[in-house]
Amino acid sequence: MRPDLRDVARRIARDIPDGAYVNLGIGLPTLVADCVGDGKEVVYHSENGILGMGPTPAPGEEDPELINAGKQPVTLLPGGAFFHHTDAFLMMRGGHVDVTVLGAFQVSETGDLANWATDDVTHPPAVGGAMDLAVGAKRVLVMTTHTTRDGSPKLLPRCTYPLTAAGVVDRVYTDLAVLDVTAEGFLVREMAAGLTRDDLQGATAARLSFAEDVGVLGQRE
């Protein structure tokens, strides 16, 4: 059974170290902001000029002037700050972001990331700050579905879409598995409950290897 994407977001939150400065990409990665427990301090950064974002506001409490880079309403924690987006990009390019969580259209077995353009003419290309984050963040995590809506694999030997950055992805979290990018390709660390290795390989174009102690994705601690 596939875990809920919020369970995937919770799994990512577990891997974010206490005290980290983190940028969450547009789309699925924004779910992570609501999943970090009270015992951990994470400072969220947005490339439109925010440092210290809090959880998603409750319905009816949204501030139209307080939004993230994806134009979604956010909150601000005590000590949070606003600044010019140029300064936000300087933080990204200067190596001051510890972790970025990005969405993806494709990831290759060598860690190449494609997340800004496809061959779908109804969805114009939009790179935003993804290129800067992919090369500037100290650790790049990807959150995505394992396949497209039509069942096509997103984890490939080589990306067929234009690259955002080459060889940058450290770990991939999907609704089927958690996978590290290693020198030998994708290494499966966790799998959804009830999924076999053959099932996972069948949904993946790249060749997979499996850790000796593969865990269960979505199993809460």
Image (cartoon, rainbow, N blue to C red):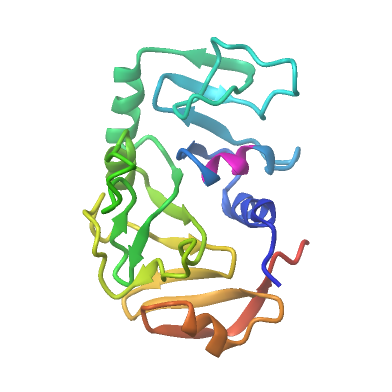
Q: Quadrant of the N terminus?
A: bottom right
Q: Is 117 placed left or right of 11 in the picture?
A: left
Residue extending farthest to the front is 122
At horizontal 39% and vertical 69% (from top left) the residue drawn is 155
At horizontal 62% and vertical 51% (from top left) the residue drawn is 9
Most foreground residue, 23 or 7: 7
Most foreground residue, 67 or 110: 67
Q: Quadrant of the C terminus?
A: bottom right
At horizontal 69% and vertical 43% (from top left) the residue drawn is 35
- How many numbered marks appear? 0
Q: Is 50 placed left or right of 196 in the picture?
A: left
* Residue 94 shows in this picture: no
Q: Is residue 17 above or below residue 20?
A: below
Q: Is residue 107 above or below residue 202?
A: above
Quarter occupied by residue 199: bottom right
Q: Is 101 placed left or right of 11 in the picture?
A: left
Q: Main secondary structure of the magenta part?
A: helix
Q: Is residue 125 magenta?
A: no
* Residue 206 shows in this picture: yes
Quarter occupied by residue 131: top left
Q: What x and y, as percent, mark residue 80?
A: 56, 17
Most foreground residue, 118 or 182: 118
Q: What x and y, as percent, mark residue 165?
A: 24, 52
Q: Is residue 172 above or below residue 77?
A: below
Q: What x and y, as percent, mark residue 189?
A: 55, 75
Q: Which residues are magenta?
A: 29-33
Q: What x and y, as percent, mark residue 111?
A: 32, 64
